[in-house]
Image (spheres, rainbow, N blue to C red):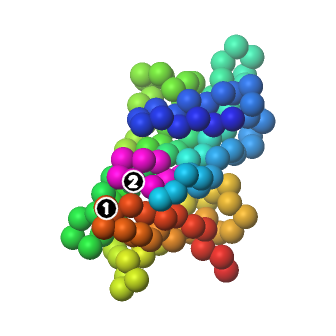
Amino acid sequence: MLSITWSVVIVHAENLEDHKMEGGITNEQPISIGETIYSAAWAKNYGTEMLLDMVVYKYVGLENNTIKIERRDKLGTGILDEENPPQITTLSLPLNGKKQALLKIDKRYNVLPSKGELVITIVDDFNRIKVEELKS
């Protein structure tokens, strides 16, 4: 089971299979600014140690006709592993005429049956978004 909060991913390792990535697109939509749109994680137990590999994509806003997404990557022995802080990257995705943008999920974190391409659509005046998998 994978639980998401505002700024922390909590992985229940006992529910993750070794080397099997769990996660996907956030179910509750539309998604507001500050909320997670996609997450994935896996855990591998090494005796008393556990290695976590995870990513969280978070919607941070709309600016100059681009959607801003924050990507947090974490690889380490746990969520609170201070020696390995998450790497944070801000992505700027240009909108097309239909108020849509395309987000490509890194192959390593793709748990979708497709190529891992997400269509993000602005759905209202509050800049909330809908996220769907791009079907080929």
Q: Which mark is residue 126?
A: 1
The image shows a total of numbered marks equal to 2
Q: Residue furthest left?
A: 64
Q: Position of residue 23 (x, y in %)?
A: 64, 47
- For the point 62% across and 41% down, the residue is 41
Do labels 2 and 1 touch, CB within 8 Å?
A: yes
Q: Position of residue 116 (x, y in %)?
A: 61, 65
- For the point 75% across and 43% down, the residue is 20
Q: Is residue 102 magenta?
A: no
The three-letter amino acid code for the residue at tag 1 is Phe
Which residue is more in the foreground, 73 or 120? Answer: 120
Where residue 113 sits, quadrant-wise, is bottom right
Can the viewer see residue 123 in this picture?
yes
85 sits to left or right of 55: left
Can the viewer see residue 93 in this picture?
no
Q: Position of residue 93 (x, y in %)?
A: 36, 69
The three-letter amino acid code for the residue at tag 2 is Ser
Give the crowd class for mark 1: few <14, some 14-19, many >=20 residues within 10 Å: few
Q: Is residue 96 above or below residue 12?
A: below
First in sequence: mark 2 or mark 1?
2
Q: Residue furthest top?
A: 48
- For the point 69% across and 68% down, the residue is 114
Q: Position of residue 61 (x, y in %)?
A: 30, 57
Q: Is residue 56 above or below residue 111?
A: above
**Residue numbers of the magenta segment:** 31-38
Q: Which residue is labeled 2 in the image?
A: 32
Dominant secondary structure of the residues highlighted in magenta in the image: loop
- For the point 56% across and 30% down, the residue is 10
Give the crowd class for mark 2: few <14, some 14-19, many >=20 residues within 10 Å: some
Q: Secondary structure at mark 1?
A: loop
